[in-house]
Image (cartoon, helix red, strand yellow):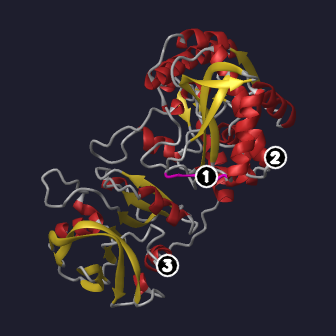
């Protein structure tokens, strides 16, 4: 039986990942594709529905993104959201025009037809609008199924072909009946069984890894973080000792991290683990470097050299495994078929395969972080491993603003240790998505023991999030912030001032570099 799937065509909406998450919460797999994906690749036995996302463009603009019109002839249910609704209207013969009054934020929604998409949706509710255009005339065969004060056609439907469009965003929490609407499309309209789970994912992935690797060996860079750890245990389940895990101490790790990784994966999980101390090589290569992207690229190139040397010592290896996640791919390349900006280069999406002439195995590349943790639980991995906060591939190098040196790494290691251990002691660590410290390239005047000091300033950062795509700063109680600050200043030599970062993502990123 083919695995059922919903396709999300990406027209540049900031909410695309929210759509994907809402679909997956219904135990249905989905994938985000650019508008120019090959329609001939669609298997109707597998693809149960298509969602056209929102986007910032206007359909009447010359540069407006379009999808292949053949998707409307496949006999597959389609739902357009915001721009997706407008594009569907225009491509099927309707008319779209600029609104006399733009509509952003909360808007009353009145449902005029409760069949299928709006089943169990109240007649009156609140929706979240974000548009400057609207459908003025519907294509032939469509009827209006909802309206708002500023948009007479807030939703439409062609019940014969199972085509639907909504001008608002059902994927955001502000739309009161949003979950119901998406569930209705996936379950009632697309008739998805909803049998995709982390257990089924593991079974399918193990089979895929065995088929891909065959009798050959696979190497994996194991950092000890959630992503690489789950990837390692999952691949080990598939091919056992033919997986060779390589742990590289790059001198940019947290306090005692190398020791903990060896203890856990060699002794507890019995993985085939090779440990390499390349800290001097990394730090020498980073000497004098300040620019963040240059740091990342140097670390990536050094990683390649270290891996290449170790791979040659291991012998014949054909495959490189990585713990790449879906947000890594989304942020590192344009899913949108146009000039979307790269936010930052993710270390584990870099040039390793091309440089090393190895084929990639990325078993987690279509999963979000919380889904990876669910996979880990299914694999009986320890909660303290699965609950670890995200840690960037370049390590402390992107948490040290300015030049990276051993002395500055040592200071930041101690600061980070006091911060994280206090959060754990106060039972806050598991309530926070990510927490870390940043060493700033400035010093400040202080007083210690009646003497003037001129020492380092650190910032501490803690955020709450679901998948890291958006995040809000964590409201740590003042008294606990005071304890953290006191421990850092009193126990870490070289620091005399602590600041707390209260910016959210967007507009800021979670990491500082």
* Label 2 with label 3: CB-CB less than 8 Å: no
The mark that comes first in sequence, 3 or 1, is 3
Binning the other alpha carbons within 10 Å of mark 1 as few (below 14), some (14 to 19) or many (20 upward) gives many
For image coordinates 82% across by 37% down, the residue present is 269
- Mark 1 — residue? 474
Q: Secondary structure at mark 1?
A: loop
Q: CA distance from mark 2 to mark 1?
A: 17 Å
Residue ID at (75%, 42%): 483
The answer to which of 133 and 377 lies nearer the viewer is 133
Residue receiving disc 2? 425
- The correct choice, above or below, for 213 with respect to 110 in the image is above
Which residue is the extreme one toward the right?
A: 267
Magenta extent: 470-476
Q: Closer to the N terminus: mark 2 or mark 3?
A: 3
In front of the other: 190 or 377: 377
Mark 3–mark 1 Cα distance, whole angstroms, equals 30 Å
Q: Position of residue 375 (x, y in %)?
A: 68, 52
As drawn, is 36 to the left or to the right of 414?
left
- What secondary structure do most residues of the magenta stretch adopt? loop
- Confirm whether residue 381 shows in the render: no
Question: Is residue 463 at least partly visible in the picture?
Answer: yes
Question: Residue 376: x, y in percent?
Answer: 72, 49
Q: Residues within 10 Å of mark 2 (few under 14, many from 20)?
A: few
- Element on which disc 2 rests: helix
Gap in Å between the C-alphas at discs 2 and 3?
40 Å
Give the mark nearer the N terminus: 2 vs 1: 2
With respect to residue 429, does 445 lie above or below? above
- Residue 473 is covered by the magenta coloring: yes
Q: Nearer the viewer, residue 338 or 423?
A: 423
Of the numbered discs in the image, which one, if any, rests on residue 180? 3
The answer to whether mark 2 and mark 1 are in CB contact below 8 A is no
Quarter holding residue 291: top left
């Amino acid at each position: 039986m083919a695995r059922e799937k919903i396709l999300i065509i990406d027209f540049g909406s900031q909410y695309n990942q929210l759509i994907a998450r809402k679909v997956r919460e219904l135990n249905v797999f989905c994938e985000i594709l650019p508008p120019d994906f090959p329609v001939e690749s669609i298997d109707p036995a597998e693809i149960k529905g298509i969602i056209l996302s929102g986007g910032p463009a206007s359909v009447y603009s010359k540069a407006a993104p379009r999808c292949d019109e053949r998707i409307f002839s496949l006999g597959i249910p389609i739902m357009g959201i915001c721009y997706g609704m407008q594009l569907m209207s225009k491509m099927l013969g309707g008319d779209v025009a600029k609104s006399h009054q733009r509509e952003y934020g909360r808007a009353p929604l009145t449902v005029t037809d409760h069949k299928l998409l709006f089943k169990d949706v109240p007649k009156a509710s609140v929706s979240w609008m974000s548009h400057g255009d609207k459908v003025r005339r519907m294509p032939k065969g469509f009827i209006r199924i909802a309206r708002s004060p500023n948009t007479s056609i807030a939703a439409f439907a062609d019940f014969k072909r199972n085509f639907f469009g909504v001008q608002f965003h059902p994927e955001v929490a502000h739309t009161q009946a949003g979950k119901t609407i998406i569930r209705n499309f996936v379950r009632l309209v697309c008739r998805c069984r909803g049998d995709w789970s982390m257990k089924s994912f593991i079974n399918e992935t193990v089979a895929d890894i065995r088929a891909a690797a065959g009798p050959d060996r696979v190497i994996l860079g194991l950092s000890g973080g959630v992503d690489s750890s789950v990837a390692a245990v999952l691949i080990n389940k598939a091919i056992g000792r033919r997986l060779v895990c390589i742990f590289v101490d790059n001198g940019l790790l947290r306090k005692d991290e190398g020791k903990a990784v060896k203890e856990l994966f060699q002794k507890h999980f019995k993985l085939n683990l090779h440990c390499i101390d390349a800290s001097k090589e990394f730090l020498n290569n980073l000497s004098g470097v300040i620019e963040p992207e240059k740091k990342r690229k140097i670390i990536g190139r050094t990683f390649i050299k270290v891996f290449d040397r170790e791979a040659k010592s291991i012998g014949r290896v054909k495959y490189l495994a990585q713990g790449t996640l879906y947000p890594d791919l989304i942020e590192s390349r344009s899913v949108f078929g146009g000039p979307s900006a790269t936010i930052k280069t993710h270390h584990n999406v870099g040039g390793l395969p091309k440089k090393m002439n190895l084929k990639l195995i990325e078993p987690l590349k279509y999963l979000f972080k919380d889904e990876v943790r669910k996979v880990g639980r299914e694999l009986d991995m320890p909660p303290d491993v699965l609950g670890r906060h995200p840690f960037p591939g370049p390590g402390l190098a992107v948490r040290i603003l300015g030049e990276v040196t051993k002395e500055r790494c040592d200071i930041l290691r101690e600061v980070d240790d006091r911060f994280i251990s206090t959060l754990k002691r106060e039972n806050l660590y598991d309530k926070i998505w990510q927490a870390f410290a940043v060493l700033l390239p400035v010093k400040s005047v202080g007083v210690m023991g009646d003497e003037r000091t001129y020492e380092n300033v650190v910032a501490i950062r803690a955020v709450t999030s679901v998948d890291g795509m958006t995040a809000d700063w964590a409201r740590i109680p003042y008294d606990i912030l005071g304890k953290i600050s006191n421990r850092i200043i009193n126990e870490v030599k070289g620091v005399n001032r602590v600041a707390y970062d209260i910016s959210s993502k967007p507009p800021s990123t979670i990491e500082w570099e």
